[in-house]
Image: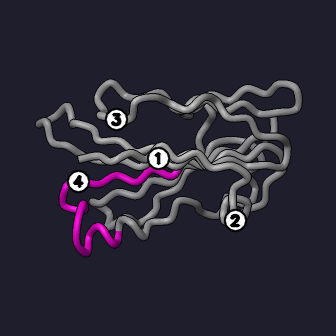
């Protein structure tokens, strides 16, 4: 299966919810160039408030992926990430799985408010899943997606 997933994960605390810090956070990209030799796999980019939202990249196995991918009848079926039991989501329902055909790519975004198991402090996370079905170039996710699913909700 020729599939590349880029997971862009941005995390922050209450300190970056307003003012200049929020402007920096909101300016963080939701897509990056892919490693030139990646033809299938998971490209992860993490940006954390503690690192001034500087990107940290690595290539991982699909075993580390939260979305479910299934190929059938010439389409790639992408199921949304499972919701953490430690997260709050002011959403009443989840969208169904999405299908894309060869040569297309999908951007799926979902945000969270999570409570830390160590000390009970809230933190926030935005996950962007860029999913391409078929051949990719390093610039694949820098353009306009074939389909976008936005599950971002208001989190206090």
Could you classify mark 1 by the number of other residues whose Cα lies within 10 Å: few (under 14), some (14-19), or many (20 or more)?
Answer: many
What SS does tag 4 mark?
loop
Disc ID at residue 56: none
- Name the front one of labels 4 and 2: 2
List the single residue furthest toward the left: 119
User: Is 25 situated left or right of 151 in this image?
Assistant: left
Residue 14 point in image, percent of width and height: 19, 55
Could you classify mark 4 by the number of other residues whose Cα lies within 10 Å: few (under 14), some (14-19), or many (20 or more)?
Answer: some
What SS does tag 1 mark?
strand
Could you classify mark 2 by the number of other residues whose Cα lies within 10 Å: few (under 14), some (14-19), or many (20 or more)?
Answer: few
User: Is 9 situated left or right of 49 in this image?
Assistant: right
Q: Which contiguous range is marked in magenta?
A: 8-24
Identify which residue is drawn at 43% across, 47% down: 152
Do tag 2 and tag 3 residues touch (Cβ < 8 Å)?
no
Label 4 to label 1, Cα distance in Å?
A: 15 Å
Label 1 to label 3, Cα distance in Å?
A: 13 Å
Residue 85 point in image, percent of width and height: 32, 24
Provide the residue designation for mark 4: 13
Provide the residue designation for mark 1: 127
Provide the residue designation for mark 2: 143
77 lies above or below 146: above
What SS does tag 2 mark?
loop
Label 4 to label 2, Cα distance in Å?
A: 30 Å
Provide the residue designation for mark 3: 89
Do tag 4 and tag 2 residues touch (Cβ < 8 Å)?
no
Mark 4 or mark 1, earlier in chain: 4
Label 2 to label 1, Cα distance in Å?
A: 18 Å
Identify which residue is drawn at 79% across, 49% down: 104
Label 2 to label 3, Cα distance in Å?
A: 29 Å
What SS does tag 3 mark?
loop
Mark 2 or mark 3, earlier in chain: 3
């Amino acid at each position: 299966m020729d599939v590349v997933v880029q997971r862009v994960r941005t995390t922050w605390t209450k300190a970056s919810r307003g003012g200049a810090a929020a402007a920096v956070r909101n300016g963080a990209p939701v897509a990056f160039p892919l490693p030139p030799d990646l033809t299938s796999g998971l490209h992860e980019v993490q940006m954390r408030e503690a690192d001034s939202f500087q990107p940290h990249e690595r290539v991982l196995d699909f075993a580390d992926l939260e979305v479910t991918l299934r190929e059938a009848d010439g389409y790639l079926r992408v199921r949304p990430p499972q919701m953490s039991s430690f997260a709050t989501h002011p959403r009443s329902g989840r969208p169904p799985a999405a299908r894309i055909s060869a040569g297309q790519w999908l951007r799926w975004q979902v945000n969270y408010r999570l409570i830390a198991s160590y000390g009970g402090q809230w933190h926030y996370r935005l996950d962007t899943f860029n999913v391409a079905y078929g051949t990719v170039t390093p610039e694949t996710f820098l353009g306009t997606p074939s389909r976008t699913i936005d599950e971002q909700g208001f989190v206090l």
